[in-house]
Image (spheres, rainbow, N blue to C red):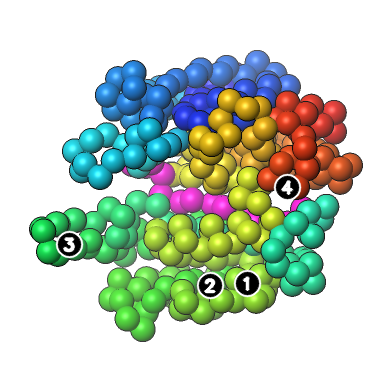
């Protein structure tokens, strides 16, 4: 039977994870669920955001389902103080997760919830494929009283493997996003992606990141797969989230080599301002569970069923507060379960 490690994390994390686990248990007979403390909650309990024991448990699972981490309680400018986000980076590194997938598909019932016009976003169905282990986030860092540096580094191998993921997922085309007119890492990126594209049946186009940011708002339906490096992907995927009307609707999957456990989590944060009130939107958590079913357990039918249930619940009028309605977390979960 499949084994899933769950990490409730902080803020609204436990509230949105509980109904998602219920849905998972309903869809997968005999699934084993093992919960562990993570993020800020782990800092409070153990002095570190990710313990060796939790990392080992994640390595031994078929997939990991994470709710949310972070909060002002643990914000600090002390470089030696533990931060919840360190747990996330440590988990990605420890599990060898190099490909972050963020699908962006506006639900028909929510087309008017987006700040963009309906006619601009209709038909949008894109996937951001973000490289997770390289780039400026992981480069050498220096700091003095008057200056600071962050080194951006990429290897040919890192670019090749993430490009293969993007071409494997594409249906119409791959849009590779870089800053090759300025950055040497981007010039390597563009060269290697072009090499991977040779022999593929999927067309490749290159866009500079500033132009890509503009086109994502102007013509989002023109995109199929957006392939990009770590920092650009972090920024562009959050921009793309607004096409759906709420960041509370966006799931993600972080994957490593085939056969290794993936990490599945909503894109939104821990929302400590509404934690404990029972009003958090659990739909991105449900959609992340659908990605777990698809990519983590190879259960495509169950994944589609869950995604369809979310669509149906919204079509029947479900609206949480972030979507302009009044539905509580429990009411949203009940609506999705009823649609299943």
Tell me, yes or no, whether the two marked residues, 2 and 1, touch with CB atoms within 8 Å.
Answer: yes
Q: Residues within 10 Å of mark 3 (few under 14, many from 20)?
A: few
Mark 3 residue element: strand
The answer to which of 140 and 271 lies nearer the viewer is 271
Tag 4 or tag 2, which sits nearer the N-term? Answer: 2
Instruction: Give the magenta-colored segment's residue range.
Output: 91-107
Which disc number belongs to residue 213?
2
Picture layout, residue 123 above or below residue 54: below
Q: Residues within 10 Å of mark 4 (few under 14, many from 20)?
A: some
Q: Residue 315: x, y in percent?
A: 86, 46
The span from disc 2 to disc 1 (Cα, nearest Å) is 7 Å
**Residue visible at 47% across and 61% down in the picture:** 235
Mark 4 residue element: helix
**Residue visible at 40% across and 24% down in the picture:** 41
- Number of marks: 4
Q: Residue 131: x, y in percent?
A: 42, 56
Instruction: Check the picture and name the quadrant holding the N terminus.
Output: top right
Q: Is residue 195 left or right of residue 170?
A: left
Q: Residue 162 in magenta?
A: no
């Amino acid at each position: 039977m499949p084994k899933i490690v769950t990490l409730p994390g902080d803020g609204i994390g436990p509230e949105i994870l509980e109904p998602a686990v219920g849905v998972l248990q309903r869809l997968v007979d005999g699934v084993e669920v093992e919960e562990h403390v993570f993020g800020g909650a782990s800092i409070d309990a153990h002095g570190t955001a990710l313990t060796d024991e939790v990392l080992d448990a994640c390595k031994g699972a078929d997939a990991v389902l994470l709710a949310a981490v972070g909060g002002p309680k643990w914000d600090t400018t002390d470089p030696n103080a533990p931060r919840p986000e360190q747990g996330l980076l440590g988990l990605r590194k420890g599990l060898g997760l190099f490909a972050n997938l963020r699908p962006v598909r506006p639900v028909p019932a929510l087309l008017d919830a987006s700040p963009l016009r309906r006619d601009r976003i209709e038909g949008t169905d894109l996937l951001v494929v973000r490289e997770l282990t390289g780039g400026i986030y992981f480069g050498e860092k220096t700091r003095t009283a008057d200056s600071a540096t962050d080194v951006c580094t990429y290897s040919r191998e890192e670019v090749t493997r993430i490009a293969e993921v993007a071409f494997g997922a594409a249906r119409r085309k791959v849009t590779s996003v870089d800053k090759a007119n300025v950055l040497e890492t981007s010039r390597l990126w563009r060269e290697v992606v072009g090499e991977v594209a040779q022999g593929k049946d999927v067309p490749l186009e290159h866009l500079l990141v500033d132009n890509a940011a503009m086109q994502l708002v102007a013509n989002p339906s023109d995109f199929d797969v957006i392939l990009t490096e770590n920092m650009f992907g972090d920024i562009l995927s959050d921009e793309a989230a607004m096409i759906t009307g709420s960041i509370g609707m966006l799931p993600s999957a972080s994957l490593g080599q085939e056969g290794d456990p993936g990490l599945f989590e909503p894109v939104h944060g821990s929302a400590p301002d509404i934690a404990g009130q029972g009003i958090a939107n659990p739909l991105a958590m449900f959609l992340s569970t659908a990605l777990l079913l698809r990519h983590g357990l190879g259960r495509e039918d169950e994944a589609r069923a869950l995604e369809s249930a979310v669509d149906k619940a919204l079509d029947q009028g479900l609206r949480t507060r972030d979507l302009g309605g009044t539905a509580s977390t429990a009411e949203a979960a009940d609506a999705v379960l009823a649609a299943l």
